[in-house]
Image (cartoon, rainbow, N blue to C red):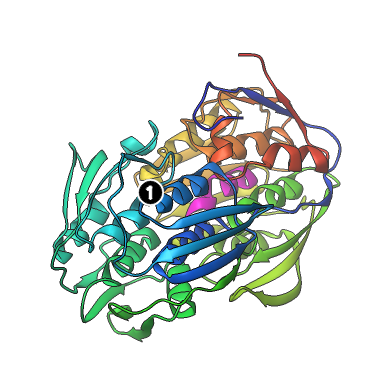
């Protein structure tokens, strides 16, 4: 499958139970950050377990364009010889970051306080996504941004020649915006402060501390207050990337809805800012065991044993949980379709501005498969049809969105009739081994002729 080439339709059908070990790829969020922080350190950072999906490969290419020496040694092992904080050189060409909103926003923050100019573009999906939420705080540092109407790519960032530190309260819960501001603050003198009312994934804070930055996190009446002291000398590190909980969500959820399934997913990150889906599934009655909890690469991990769960009930998902599971609502809505009763997901308006409008994409696809849904600007409600109760039989539009594609392919594994997605090629951006991993567990996936 190609994330940038022709459409690749794919069909999934109900087969036997899923069985075996699902070794999902490394965490995408941590992979992006390992490459970026390695490029800002002085010396050689060694990374193992790096996700080699197209999104992360595009970030590696961008770090090379800024002057870092980034080398792949095979099987997820990479080295980055960095240029130091403020040491980026000006790219000779436009930076194509493909489908990755994380890559685009973090890299913009990284270069915004260095006096260089860089132009960013991406695929058709990314060019529709708003960048103003990042460029607005970058303006406060002294950077300038010139993009298409609505703050969209292609966009040129002119880095600040004389950056100043900022104090910024996040208007929306976004780890990408928080990280972009912190990365910009690295090359600003003094203290940059970020305030978030709701905690979001904290990989940037953990990695900043690991690379030697001075950073303090305090819980106050304002929320989480993160104070970063600028212009540190970052030290190269050895980074072991844990397995991605967002990728693990797909084999986990498929096993929960496919009758007779029993799988193990080893070494999955259990970071408290990322585990909202797993808390929700357990509350619904999912049979998930969290075995051998431990720490790897500064992140908590566990091995998951997952079995078919025919007695899951719909629940109200607390809206404050949304930041810890924002990428998992599409696959949760699939599980909800096979539960009994209503599953109510509120506080999810952020899904409207992801790779696609994920609320609309899931609602239309579920309806086509015979599932009753309700939605408004900030809510998705799925009326469950019980184990094996989803008719299926539809062709679902993925809108160049990898998570939409994988979610509907998982639905087809348990529906009464096969489900087709119009384009599975975007899956390569985040989970390049999805097809092989799922068929290895016993899933019936079939590529279709265009």
Crowding around mark 1 (Cα neighbors within 10 Å: few <14, some 14 to 19, many 20+) is many
Using residue 378 as the reference point, say whether residue 287 is left or right of it: right
- Image point 60% across, 29% down: which residue? 370
Q: Is residue 164 visible?
A: yes
At a point 63% along the width and 64% down the height, the residue shown is: 242
- Work out whether residue 76 or residue 308 is closer to the camera in this orientation and state it: 76
Q: Given the current orientation, which residue lies at the most extreme top position? A: 450
Give the camera-side residue of 342 and 181.
181
According to the picture, the residue beneath numbered tag 1 turns out to be: 65
What range of the chain is rendered magenta? 324-336
Query: In the rendered image, which quarter contains the N terminus?
Result: top right
Q: Quadrant of the C terminus?
A: top right
Residue 287, x across and y down, in percent: 76, 60
Relative to 223, 396 lies left or right = right
Instruction: Indicate the position of residue 48 as horizontal and vertical percent values.
Output: 64, 62
What is the quadrant of residue 150 in the picture?
A: top left
Q: Is residue 391 magenta?
A: no
Magenta region, main secondary structure: helix
Residue 318 visible: no
Residue found 56% across the figure and 61% down from its top: 79
Position of residue 56 measured from the top left corner of the image (x, y, whole percent): 51, 49
* Dot 1: element: helix
Q: Is residue 335 magenta?
A: yes
């Amino acid at each position: 499958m190609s994330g940038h080439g022709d459409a690749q339709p794919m069909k999934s059908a109900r087969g036997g139970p899923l069985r075996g070990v699902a070794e999902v790829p490394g965490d995408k969020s941590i992979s992006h950050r390992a490459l970026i922080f390695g490029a800002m350190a002085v010396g050689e950072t060694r990374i193992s377990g790096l996700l080699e999906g197209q999104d992360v490969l595009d970030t590696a290419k961008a770090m090379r364009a800024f002057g870092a020496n980034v080398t792949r040694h095979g099987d997820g092992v990479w080295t980055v010889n960095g240029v130091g904080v403020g040491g980026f050189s000006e790219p000779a060409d436009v930076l194509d970051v493909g489908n990755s909103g994380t890559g685009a926003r973090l890299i913009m923050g990284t270069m915004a306080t260095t006096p260089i100019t860089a132009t960013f573009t991406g695929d058709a999906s990314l060019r529709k996504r708003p960048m103003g939420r990042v460029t607005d705080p970058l303006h406060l540092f002294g950077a300038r941004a010139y993009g298409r109407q609505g703050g969209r790519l292609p966009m040129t960032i002119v880095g600040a020649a004389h950056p100043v530190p900022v104090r910024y309260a996040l208007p929306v819960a976004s780890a990408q915006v928080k990280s972009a501001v912190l990365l910009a603050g690295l090359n600003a003198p003094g203290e940059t402060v970020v305030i978030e009312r709701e905690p979001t994934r904290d990989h940037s804070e953990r990695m900043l501390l690991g690379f030697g930055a001075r950073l303090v996190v305090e819980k106050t009446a304002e929320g989480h207050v993160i104070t970063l002291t600028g212009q540190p000398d970052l030290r190269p590190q050895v980074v072991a990337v844990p397995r991605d909980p967002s990728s693990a969500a797909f084999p986990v959820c498929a096993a929960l809805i496919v009758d007779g399934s029993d799988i193990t997913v080893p070494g999955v990150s259990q970071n408290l800012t990322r585990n909202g889906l797993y808390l929700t599934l357990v509350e619904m009655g999912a049979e998930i065991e969290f075995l051998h909890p431990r720490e790897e690469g500064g992140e908590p991990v566990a091995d998951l044993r997952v079995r078919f769960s025919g007695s899951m009930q719909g629940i109200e998902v607390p809206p404050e949980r949304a930041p810890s599971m924002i990428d998992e609502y599409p696959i949760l809505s699939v599980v909800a379709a096979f539960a009994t009763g209503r599953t109510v997901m509120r506080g999810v308006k952020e899904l409207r501005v992801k790779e696609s409008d994920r609320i609309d994409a899931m609602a239309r696809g579920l309806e086509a498969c015979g599932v009753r849904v309700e939605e408004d600007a900030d809510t998705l409600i799925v009326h469950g049809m019980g184990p094996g109760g989803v008719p299926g039989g539809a062709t679902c539009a993925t809108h160049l969105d990898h998570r939409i594609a994988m979610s509907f392919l998982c639905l087809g594994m348990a529906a009464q009739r096969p489900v087709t997605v119009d384009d599975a090629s975007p899956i390569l951006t985040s989970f390049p081994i999805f097809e092989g991993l799922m068929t290895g567990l016993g899933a019936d996936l079939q590529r279709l002729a265009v």
